[in-house]
Image (cartoon, rainbow, N blue to C red):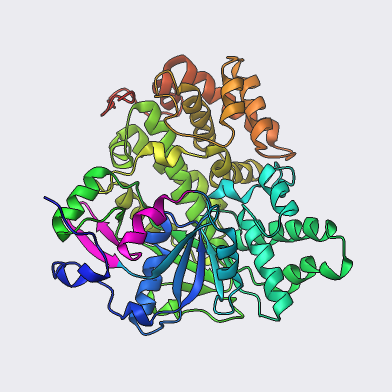
Amino acid sequence: MTRSHLSDATLSSLPTAARIPAYDRGKVTSGIVHLGVGAFHRAHQAAYVDECLAAGETGWGIIGVSLRSPDTRDALAPQDGLYTLAIRSSGEEELRVIGSIGSMLVAPENPEAVLAALADPGTRIVTLTITEKAYLRAAGGRLDAAHPDIVHDLANPGAPRTAHGFIAEALARRRAAGTQPFTVLCCDNLPANGATLHRLMIEFAGLRDAGLAQAAEAGLTRHVTDEVAFPSSMVDRIVPATTDADRTRIAAELGVEDAWPVMTEPFRQWVIEDNFPGGRPAWEQFGVTMVGDVGPFEDMKLRLLNGAHSAIAYLGLLCGHATVDRAFADPAIRQFVDALWAEAIPTLPEDAGLDTAAYTAELAERFSNTALAHRTAQIANDGSQKLPQRIIASAIECLEAGTEMVHLTLVVAAWIAACAARGKTLPEGHFTDPLDTQLTALLSQQLPANETVTAVFDLAGFAGDHAERQTLIQLVAVHLVHLRRDGTTLAFAALGIDGERRSADEDPKR
């Protein structure tokens, strides 16, 4: 049976159980440009903005920008930017049609159109979900000035490829036109993400200013440093990859085809530093927490949720578990995660009023959600970029405080072992990392564990020149010896965890 596509024209035909935009989309104007329109943005920020629009704040529509692939644009353009958000728990599913994305641009196809949208005086906020690796940081966290895309953007400011290049050129155009700068709101899992992006943009602007022939054209560095707001934020919602089975199910329920629905959980959280000189939506009316300091919330999320997610992903892959709920149901992994939390919680600030007991109880419920089918391989991507803030930072603080942290170091060893397992016990390319070329060459040498870990730390820049770096390497190497000798069974046994009774629920080669 051929069905119509989801669109403005078919909204009225949807079943009454599905929530549709409660506003006239024709009256919405764009106030936000979002860089990196992936599933997470569509399940999180775009859903919050949808509620703002429904409450009458119609000046905050979103122009979405894909920095690389046209896939999302190609899926949503025939649907007038509409898509279904399926909010799934173990027992039920709620369908919402989101209408906050008014149009979409693909940067490689038309960088000038993206720059025009960014430079438009109506754009007051630029948000980003481009993943950790797209911030192009070198070892030590500084901007990778030698990256080919950074080099290109410095030489071709009017046709950029990176978020850095687009933001810098748009700010320069606004400054030349006497237009107030937009606020840049980072929504990626970076430590102190607003301050981190601000620092990277200052470095980029400095390189750009240094390359200008006319001194009168320079000055962007000072402008970015002193006049552009970069509030930090913390985002949280689990968003697994959409499958063809999801598309088929959603189409049957709605009676129309949706090329790219998004799956998510009922839980959502957004904590934002309240620093928006050009104005902002009244997000606090829709569950967003506006604060003066995001740091404690960010640390709790990175170390307890994201850290546990990485542990579940790598240990789950090594144990043959394809999804988070199946891995978390493994008694050995569940015991491990509880112990991991016990190590990480003391590294969080005691005076911030964080309820870690309630938070971890909620996390356990979320990880057990059987309806999400959040794949461990999806979470496993980009470990070299994620582990420093999720695991390494906690481990170093434990070493400095003299507290136990053997579970934290096993996560790092499990990442190395999972990387080495690709093409052997795991499928080739089962998950990816920006350092894959170097990692594959290094791990193929089958060096002794201590040498392997040292080389990986050198490659990824883990722990930098910290005084405890060698101790950390030695602790990770001990776990890697166990994983190489007898897999997770011996690694768990060394921690007093019985891993013998767990069984793989899926052949990882399938």
Residue at the spot 47% in from the left edge and 39% down from the top edge: 381
Q: Residue at x 14, y 59 (%)?
A: 255
119 w.r.t. 419: above or below: below
Q: Is 371 left or right of 456, judged from the image as shown?
A: left
Q: Which residue is depicted at the point 60% across and 72% down? A: 183
Q: Nearer the viewer, residue 221 or 91?
A: 221
Q: Residue at x 54, y 79 (%)?
A: 122
Q: From the viewer's perspective, is residue 183 above or below residue 36? A: below
As drawn, the residue found furthest toward the left would be 1
The answer to whether 338 is drawn above or below residue 104 in the figure is: above
Residue 486 place in picture, x, y as percent:
43, 16
Q: Is residue 119 left or right of residue 131?
A: right
Closer-to-camera residue (327/1): 1
The magenta-colored residue range is: 69-97
Q: How many marks?
A: 0
Q: Is residue 129 visible?
A: yes
Residue 20 sits in which quadrant? Answer: bottom left
Can I make out residue 339 in this image?
no
The x and y percentages for residue 82 are 32, 64
Q: Position of residue 91 (x, y in %)?
A: 17, 54
Q: Quadrant of residue 140?
A: top right
Residue 72 within the magenta-colored segment of the rendering: yes
Give the position of the C terminus as an image quadrant. top left
Q: Say if the magenta span includes residue 65.
A: no
